[in-house]
Each structure stands twice: as C-alpha cells, then as structure tokens.
Amino acid sequence: MTTAPPSDDTMLEIDVRKEHGHTVVEVGGELDVFTSARLRTVLFDPALCAGPRVVVDLGRVTFMDSTSIGVLVAARRWHASRDAEVRLVCTEGPVLKVLGLVMLDRVFGIYDSVADATA
C-alpha cells in the first residue's frame, strides 16, 4: 500500500493499492476546497494510478464539496483519454446523496464494494 504525498492536513487520508490489476484509491475524511488538491495529485499521477481501472473508494469520506466533485469529474475525463475508467465505491450517507443530487450517479459507475468495482 502506498500513502499519498505527505501533507500537514490531517482531515484527509488517502491510501493507494493494486487489486486484481486495478488501482484502488481509498479516501477517508473530508473532501473539500482545502483537501481536494491532495486527491487530485493522486488521481492524476500516472505512476500511482496505472491500469485499466481506477476505483475510488469513498466509503470513509464524511464530507464532500463541489471542489472535490470537480476533481472526480476531471479525473474521469483524464483517465478516459488514456483508455482507463474511474469507478466509485459509495454505499450510503451524505456522500452518496451528494453524488445523486449532482447526477454523478449517472456519469460514474457507483458500486457497493471494491470487490464489485474491480470485478
């Protein structure tokens, strides 16, 4: 498992690992205007996020604002231009509600588990 670039920010945890040939980015904490740059750095790093599929596990995210939504959409476009797919894991709570409100549940594949997203 690889940890994202260090930061003074303790409100966000990002871990990156490989599963079944795909990249899994596990995110925990608050995704907002102050922390979204860290997620962007990870998702746009071709060394960290290589492979046909990048799975972003939002299961431990407690808050998500429009800045982080923009990061996810931009990452989807960037990976698609490299013939890769971004899938999200989110099963309940305020983050899933936000994704539905901005209709990202129609743009991204949203899965109940990392196992489902990497299958």
Image (cartoon, rainbow, N blue to C red):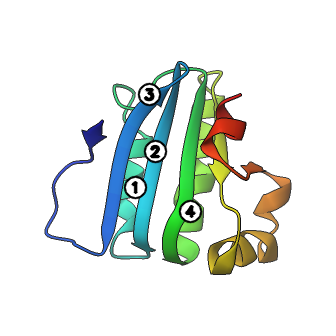
Q: Are marks 1 and 2 in contact (CB under 8 Å)?
A: yes
User: Closer to the N terminus: mark 3 or mark 2?
Assistant: 3
Residue occupying the point 30% across, 36% down: 1
For residue 6, say whether it is visible: yes
User: Closer to the N terminus: mark 1 or mark 2?
Assistant: 2
For residue 49, say whether it is visible: no
Where residue 24 sits: x, y (%)? 49, 38
Q: Nearer the viewer, mark 3 or mark 1?
A: 3
Circle 3 — which element?
strand
Residue occupying the point 61% across, 42% down: 114
Q: CA distance from mark 4 to mark 1?
A: 15 Å
Q: Are marks 3 and 2 in contact (CB under 8 Å)?
A: no
User: Closer to the N terminus: mark 3 or mark 1?
Assistant: 3
Q: Is residue 118 left or right of residue 61?
A: right
Q: Nearer the viewer, mark 1 or mark 2?
A: 2
Residue occupying the point 55% across, 21% down: 20
Q: CA distance from mark 1 to mark 2?
A: 9 Å
| Location of mark 4 (residue) | 59
| Location of mark 3 (residue) | 18
Total of numbered circles in the picture?
4
Q: Nearer the viewer, mark 2 or mark 4?
A: 4
Q: Which is nearer the eye, 55 or 91?
A: 91
Q: Amino acid at mark 4?
A: Gly
| Location of mark 2 (residue) | 25
Circle 2 — which element?
strand
